[in-house]
Image: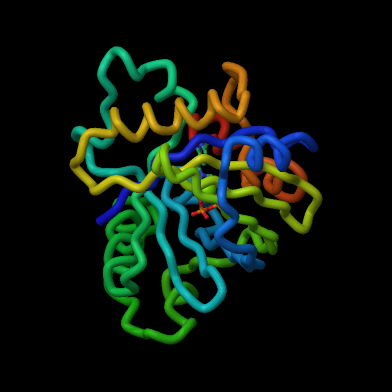
């Protein structure tokens, strides 16, 4: 199981030129349509668990198991505070099992179900789509740093970049943080505070109650 270590950055007009100057290679451009699901009481996202249907595939992003992938040794603390780490599960049976597990511990959790493999299963768990948007994503690799860089333009008018490294769950993240820090430096990223992701901006604009609850729970 891989864990995605990523740092978001503000994507200004000069970013394209800087990517070219440092030898980043464009590996593709695609449109991504995402639908995110949760219960009416936001029981998944309040546990930092993000269920989405990306194009025709289900995906679940959740914090990695406690251990090396989550901890950070002293020297990487500053970079670590700028990076997020999420396990990305793509096996539908595992997604359904994990979602049921999370909801079982909630007040309104319903045991049992889902059995369906079509798209009825979220409804059986009282999960509804709370966010839906399309992103134009242009991806680059920075070979010598071993990182991928995505430039995202969301259809609701927000642009953000991400430097991303995949590590195996349970592995040290120190080297991933160093790769991200080197790439950030080469891109001329100053020591900035946490940069808002697409979901932060989407919820602030279209689901303010949900956003406030996630902020109060220190999820966003
Ligand atoms: C910096 C940061 N990012 C996300 C979260 C939590 N979160 C909010 S929405 C969310 C799910 C979407 O993650 P994000 O990387 O923002 O979207 P996207 O880039 O389209 O997904 P990818 O293609 O990388 O899989 C998470 C994990 C957080 N607490 N802090
Ligand atoms: Mg991302």
Q: Is residue 145 left or right of residue 203?
A: left
Tell me: residue 57, above or below residue 11: below
Tell me: residue 157, above or below residue 177: below
Quarter of the rendering containing residue 76: top left
Work out which residue is located at the far top of the displayed protein and give it: 74
The residue lying toward the viewer, choosing from 82 and 147, is 147
Q: How is the image coloured?
A: rainbow
Q: Position of residue 60 (x, y in %)?
A: 40, 59
- Image quarter of the N terminus: bottom left
Q: Is residue 15 left or right of residue 117?
A: right
Residue at 75% across / 50% down in the picture?
A: 206
- State how many labels appear: 0
Tell me: residue 69, above or below residue 131: above
The residue lying toward the viewer, choosing from 87 and 151, is 151
- Image quarter of the C terminus: top right
Quarter of the rendering containing residue 28: bottom right
Q: Is residue 180 left or right of residue 191?
A: left
Residue at 50% across / 49% down in the picture?
A: 141
The residue lying toward the viewer, choosing from 91 and 83, is 83
Q: Position of residue 204 (x, y in %)?
A: 72, 41
Residue at 48% across / 82% down in the picture?
A: 119
Q: Position of residue 106 (x, y in %)?
A: 36, 51
Residue 208 in view, yes or no: no
Q: Is residue 201 left or right of residue 23?
A: right
Residue 193 in view, yes or no: yes
Tell me: residue 104, above or below residue 128: above
Residue at 43% across / 16% down in the picture?
A: 78
Q: Position of residue 48 (x, y in %)?
A: 43, 44
């Amino acid at each position: 199981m891989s864990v995605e270590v990523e740092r978001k950055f503000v994507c200004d007009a000069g970013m394209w030129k800087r990517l070219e100057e440092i030898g980043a290679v464009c590996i593709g451009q695609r449109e991504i349509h995402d639908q995110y699901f949760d219960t009416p009481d936001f029981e998944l996202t309040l546990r930092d668990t993000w269920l989405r249907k990306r194009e025709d595939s289900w995906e679940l992003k959740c914090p990695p198991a406690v251990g090396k992938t989550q901890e950070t040794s002293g020297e990487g603390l500053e970079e670590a505070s700028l990076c997020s780490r999420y396990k990305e599960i793509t096996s539908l049976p595992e997604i359904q099992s994990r979602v049921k597990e999370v909801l079982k511990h909630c007040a309104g959790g319903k045991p049992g179900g889902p059995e369906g493999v079509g798209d009825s299963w979220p409804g059986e768990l009282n999960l509804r789509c709370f966010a839906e948007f399309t992103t134009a994503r242009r991806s680059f690799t920075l070979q010598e740093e071993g990182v991928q860089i995505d430039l995202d333009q969301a259809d609701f008018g927000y642009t953000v970049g991400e430097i991303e490294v995949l590590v195996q769950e349970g592995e040290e993240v120190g080297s991933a943080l160093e790769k991200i820090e080197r790439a950030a430096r080469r891109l001329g990223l100053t020591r900035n505070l946490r940069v808002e992701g697409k979901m932060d901006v989407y919820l602030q604009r279209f689901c303010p109650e949900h956003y406030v609850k996630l902020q109060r729970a220190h999820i966003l």
